[in-house]
Amino acid sequence: MQQFNLFISLFSLRRLVCAFYLLHISSYITAQTPTDQDCGGAIPVCQEVYNQANSYSGEGNIIGEINPINSCLGVGERNCVWYTMTIQQDGLFNFTITPNNPNDDYDWAVFNLTSAGCADIANDPSLEASCNFSGNTGNSGITGANGQTTGIGSSQNEDPIPVVAGETYYIIVGNFNASQSGYTLDMTASTATIFDNVTPTLKTITAPVFCTDNSVSFEFSENMLCSTVSQADFALVGPGGPYTINGFTGGACDLGANFERNFSLTFNPAISSGGTYTLQIAGSVTDLCGNEAPIGSGLDFEITAIPLDSLVTPDICGEGAGTATVITPIGGGPFSYSWSPNVSNTDLATNLTAGTYTVTVSDIGGGCPQNIEIIVPSTPSPVASFRANPLKMSYLDPYCEFTENSNGSVSWLWDFGDGSSTETIQNPVHTFPGTGDFPVTLTITNADGCTDDTTIIVTVTFLSTIYIPNAFTPGRGLLNDTFGPIGEGIAEANFNMRIFDRWGKQIFYSYTPSLQWDGTDAGTEKILPQGVYVYNISLFDLNGEKHEYIGAVTLLER
């Protein structure tokens, strides 16, 4: 202000202004589009120094934002401009306003609107964090919250303001003189981080969301530029989707302001089931300093449906003996039940096999249906297993030891596959009565009465002793007067023996072990001369194993 002798006394002026404010406070116009001369259109602080070449004139479109009764600004808004900032790091907010014309009288106030809005300033004096309405008393008209509270011009200054990260402040700067000279706003002496370089995020859901609702209200971590926020920038994901965003409101943005942090969305279909829902950023939205919220980031919220629990008994032996009961809140309901698979339409299902069942429970009186997944287990089934030592043995020693190594067995039944009596001891010993393959089966039973069996083939073999002579003397009526394989365990079937002379001519053939070569030519029936002949013998033993022999035999004369 200029010197008091050029104006009416500050006291008288203040009384006049207050009277004017009280007469016109009802004409506070909130539907006008705010400009940077209004709190709702404040300039975001994104740098430390602002050089304003020309002074602002008037008080913007929103009349009566400053109430002289509740503020030190005795004339309310006068040739003013607004700034806003969200503190990023604790410290002191220190600023100095230096008029371009040292005779100009600049006044200012700082409001903490962390938990309030612009419309609250007029009626809540506690929002004013600091203020100075002193006249220009020298020192080139310098004013601010800079701590220069002694010496020339000290009445124009206040102490720096302690601020905390996350708080939001608004600064109004007014030119009492109404000159056209501007000013410099310098905040470089602040120890707090005052301009925003932090990514904005969705902070919280601001109103409860219930089943059947089709809207959600939410808050960003800081003010967002209205021009960057629209319904296309959001998505809702959750049970019962997909969801389509079909409406959007933005508080101050709807009144033409430049920024807002609280928004609401409408969507369809309406919420119809409980669970976790996520409100996601789907487009580019920025804060006042151009920091962009990460696309794809989101904010979860829960829709609580009917609290459910279950009581289950297992299926035993895979026989469909399990049960499941859905437990609902005492005093609630009545409820309806839909089971998948369709095994019941009440809270109880019986004769269940092991598996997973989904039950949808609905309150007939209204509200969200709720699903519960019920797992019916099966009691551990026994697994039969044993070892046989040896697995293969000679008929001369057909003695076998059996060792049971099953899972969960409490009783045993052995069938040795040879027509003999069964055994019920855990680890029996058995002597087989003959040769062959014997299917030995172990059947076990567990404590729940469930059974399992397994079979192992045990083989008792015939001991084959086969010898091929290397010489014989035919026609003598002695033991060595024919040629062929000698021994025990030679099978009659599939026997073949061929004899060839030195030139490769076949001279004898036999298809049975009992028909041996007597030294004659099968074609002429004459005794062949002494010499070396070649044989090719193929036979099977009584164990079914094939044997092949190729070699030479000497025919000796009598």
Image (cartoon, helix red, strand yellow):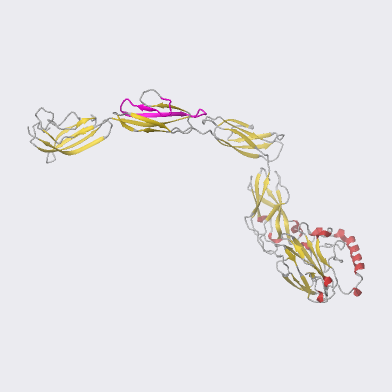
- Quadrant in the rendering for residue 227: bottom right
**Rendered location of residue 306, percent (x, y):** 68, 39
Magenta-drawn segment: 423-450
Q: Nearer the viewer, residue 508 or 88?
A: 88
Relative to 446, is 510 on the left or the right? left
Relative to 24, is 203 on the left or the right? left
- Residue placed at 67% from the left, 57% from the top? 201
**Rendered location of residue 486, percent (x, y):** 19, 31
- Quadrant in the rendering for residue 181: bottom right
- Quadrant in the rendering for residue 312: top right
- Residue placed at 68% from the left, 51% from the top? 246
Q: Is residue 310 magenta?
A: no
- Residue placed at 69% from the left, 54% from the top? 203
Query: Quadrant location of the C terminus?
Result: top left
**Rendered location of residue 463, percent (x, y):** 26, 31
With respect to residue 506, does 193 lie above or below?
A: below
Q: Is residue 429 magenta?
A: yes
Q: Nearer the viewer, residue 157 or 506?
A: 157
**Rendered location of residue 236, percent (x, y):** 65, 50
